[in-house]
Each structure stands twice: as structure tokens, then as C-alpha cells.
Image: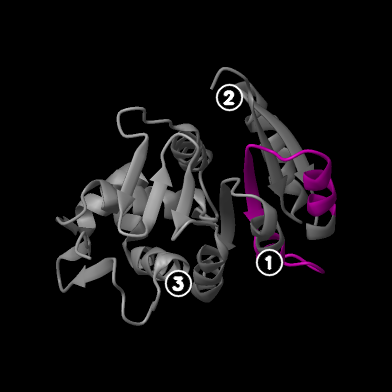
Amino acid sequence: MNRRASVLVVDDEPQILRVMRASLPPRGYDVRVAANGQEAIKLIEKQMPDLVILDLIMPGMSGLEVCRIIRKTSSVPIIVLSARGVESDKISALDLGADDYVTKPFSMDELLARMRAVLRRFASVESEEPLLNVGDITIDVSSRQVLVAGREVKLTPKEFDVLKHLMTNAGKVVTRQTLLQSVWGSKSLEQAGYLRVFINQLRRKIEPDPENPRYILTEPWIGYKFSNQD
């Protein structure tokens, strides 16, 4: 990115906010911090950041509620922070549109790698295939716009990347490993348990009948295929 990416860190643990304020600016990020969900929403209303790092368990407004509010109006990348032992909260956050998660306690190197990955995916523009169209589904790669039967559908950055990869390979079986590597990169094995969550989210948004998908078909024990049959 030509400019410094802006990051909003939302966490009720003062020590984490101190670490973020000290560690991220030297790595090229502009940092704002919020100690709770209400403060985070106020800061977002003033200026939308390029990335949100969001704690899930906070007093008052939870991180899940913050994620829900953000996703009503924005597809800004969201990385959630999750304490060990709250697997259901991770699933809920991903289901609400979060793009990745980091488990507490975490290493700064891991967090920085996740940040770079989601920002690259969000900012990427692929000019070789500006439009992909299969059946009633059209995606504009440059603007990251998705149309279903002419109606715009809002996807999170990660959902968009999954859909784009499947549509690029329409009619072909894409293995879970290939899809994970393409969308999640080097951390793909850690995301294997959540691929089904994103597939289910996409089906709810683009399929006429999510329970009987027409487009995103499951190939048992192998992966998924985006059907190009009418």
C-alpha cells in the first residue's frame, strides 16, 4: 500500500492496547485504539479504518455485536482476538463476517502476518479477469462487487475471495487444500475447520435455495465445485 494502513484495535485489556500502540507504528501502521465496543463504533463513524482488530469478550457491547454493526455498512477486514476455550465465539464471529482470528495469547509476528494477508486480499485488483459471470452470478473483480440476478449482494473480503476462486475454476472440482491455500495462504491448515462456515455463508447469500445449492456443490471427501450448468 502506498500510504500507511490505518488499524483500529478494540480490546478492554490495557496491556494489549499498549503493545499495539508500541508495536504497530514502527511496522508502518497508523493505530487508533478503543477500550470497548461503544468507543469503537464512535471512532468508526468518524473514520473507517483499513483494518479492525477486535476482541470478542468485552464488557457492555461484545465484539460479536461490534462485528454485526460494522458488517451492516462495511466490508472492512476484521481480525478477531479470541481467548482459548471459546470455539463457539470464533465460529459466531466468522459467521457474522469476520475474516480471520488470532487466539490469545498470540505472538506479534503471527498477528502481523495475518494483518498483511487480509490487507493484501482486500486491496488486490486482478485486471486479467475484470468480470466473472456464471448463471445469475456476476462478480466485478476490480470493484469487488457481486450481483445475483442483478441484485447486489454484500460479501466480506474472505467470502469474496472464496467465491472468486470457485468461479474462476467453474466446472472444476477445487480441493479443500487448494482453496484453503489460495484464500488463507501459509496458515491454511489452521483454517480448515472454518472453510465450511464460509461456504455456508456464501450459499445463504447467493443460492436460490441454500439447502439445495445450485452453484456451490460439495464433492464429498474432496472439496467444492462451482457448477456452470444451467
Residues packed near mark 2 inside 10 Å, few (<14), some (14 to 19) or many (20 plus): few
In the image, the segment drawn in magenta is 39-66
Percent across and percent down for residue 10 are 72, 51
Q: Is residue 217 above or below residue 54?
A: below
Which residue is labeled 2 in the image?
27
Drawn side of residue 123 relative to residue 129, left or right: right
Amino acid type for the residue under numbered disc 1: Ile
Tag 2 or tag 3, which sits nearer the N-term? Answer: 2
C-alpha separation, residue under disc 3 versus residue under disc 2: 38 Å
Q: Residue at x 64, y 46 (%)?
A: 52
Label disc, if present, on residue 204 of the rendered structure: 3
Tag 2 or tag 1, which sits nearer the N-term? Answer: 2
Percent across and percent down for residue 185 are 32, 43
Q: Residue at x 29, y 71 (%)?
A: 214
Which residue is labeled 1 in the image?
57
Q: Are marks 3 and 2 in contact (CB under 8 Å)?
A: no
- Tell me where residue 131 sits by quadrant: top left
| Residue 41 among those drawn in magenta | yes
